[in-house]
Amino acid sequence: MKHTTQEFPVSPTIARMQSSSTIAAMQAATKMRAEGIDVVDFGAGEPDFDTPAHIKHAAIEAMRNGETKYTPTAGTKAFVKAITDYYKREFDVSIDATEVMGTAGGKQGIFNAVVALACSGDEVLIAKPYWVSFPEMVTFAGATSAFIETEDNDFQLTAEHVARSITPRTKLLIVNSPSNPSGRVIPIDEFCRIIETCAARGVYVISDECYVRIVYPPAEVFSATTLPAELRDYICVSGSFSKTYAMTGWRIGYTIAPQAWTKAMLKIEQHSTSNPCSIAQAAGIEAFTASQDCVAGMLNEYRKRRDWLIPALNDIPGVRCTMPEGAFYAFPDVRGCLKGELKTSGDFADLLLREAQTVVTDGAGFGAEGFVRISYATSLERLQEGVRRIRDVVERFAS
Ligand code: GLU
């Protein structure tokens, strides 16, 4: 084979994209574990629970029954029906089958929704802090991300923020409540005002509802699918089984969007992945149709961990953390710990990795330098161990 030292001529679009810092943090932890290091992993944005047994069983049965072939691009009839029935039952909303498209996880749904709509010359509004993949999808589409600062309101996006940020070039807003990484949940009336503001100016909205079921009372669960039809004309909801049912590795999710938007997304899917995995669809049907007790059980655990973690973080000198209302992330401000050689939250994350074998994700990748993300989708014992290690490093460094 001819050996060449020539640099690979990567496309300019891909060259402009950043690698995923969330995936990098997960891989760093995996590598350390493989080396036999006693790592505390607060990096992985994935449930520590196993997929519930009844869901696995449904997938095994599907394989036994020969459900191992291509399916329609949007998913099997039964999969789409399980989704529309679930939204009827859980949210009392009627969704037409033509508005649903199955995807390989929530990420593919958001990707397809962005790429189907935004292109060169368009601006896409993204509130800080944002999930690391949003701006990269916008870059892939050839459009420009326009970031909304929300630190003035403790990372809570408002309709006023959105109204101030819309320009004649704004095509789309991506909203994510509960938020990864802040865990903030937008109150329902504010959420409605945000969508109304967008619709009134002809701006479309992607509502990433990956964490919709991980909301701690008194915060309320809200899905944009429940909005009136004239607003829904502007909305693509991205849903996922990953977090709700501890199914991250199955890569199964869906979108709910107006027919025309769905049709455009289907074209992308036809020419990229053909259809979501047939076996994962069978598992998804079971997840949505069986008892939801497993979801309540996991939520209860996350809530207990959150209630322990946030005061414990606030107790570390220089660390300040708002109580998140949803998801399974704490997003502490660590600027009070930065001094001397420790200049950025990235330096802080590196220090924790080096000195405490504790993985956190640097906030800079989420558009929030000075913050780190701590995933508490890990046992209370490991949380306690990790916080003890962080406190130890912070105190040692401060002295
Ligand atoms: N969504 C998770 C996270 O934010 C998994 C990694 C990813 O897909 O970004 O950590």
Image (cartoon, helix red, strand yellow):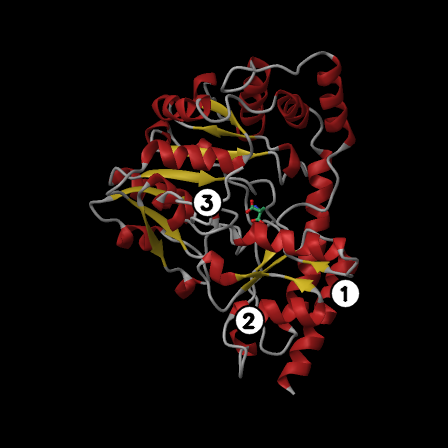
Of residues 207 and 16, the one nearer the viewer is 16
Q: Is residue 241 left or right of residue 363?
A: right
Q: Crowding at label 2, few (<14), some or many (≥20) Cα neighbours within 10 Å?
A: some
In the image, which disc is placed on residue 46? none
Name the residue at the front extreme: 2
Quadrant for residue 287, please give it.
Answer: top right
Q: Separation of disc 2 and disc 3 at Cα?
A: 37 Å
Residue depicted at x 29% and y 38%: 119
Q: Earlier in the sequence, mark 2 or mark 3?
A: 3
Please tell me which residue is depicted at 57% across the width and 77% down the height of the picture.
Answer: 337
Amino acid carrying mark 2 in the image: Asp
Q: Which residue is mark 3?
A: 188
Q: Earlier in the sequence, mark 2 or mark 1?
A: 2
Q: Label 3 near label 2: C-beta < 8 Å?
A: no
Residue displayed at 23% across by 43% down: 121
The spot of residue 78 in percent (x, y) is 59, 15
Q: Element under label 2?
A: helix
Q: Amino acid at mark 1?
A: Glu
Whether 23 is drawn above or below 384: the answer is: above
- From the image, state whether disc 2 or disc 3 is nearer to you: 2
Instruction: Report which residue position mark 2 lands on.
Output: 347
Residue 189, visible in the rendered structure: no
Whether 318 is drawn above or below 238: the answer is below
Residue at 56% x, 15% y: name it. 71
- Judging by the rendered image, the residue that carries numbered circle 1 is 385
Separation of disc 1 and disc 3 at Cα? 36 Å
Quadrant location of the C terminus? bottom right
Going by the numbered disc 3, the residue's amino acid type is Ile
Tell me residue 384's x, y (percent): 75, 64
Quadrant location of the N terminus in the rendered image: top right
Q: Residues within 10 Å of mark 1 (few under 14, many from 20)?
A: few
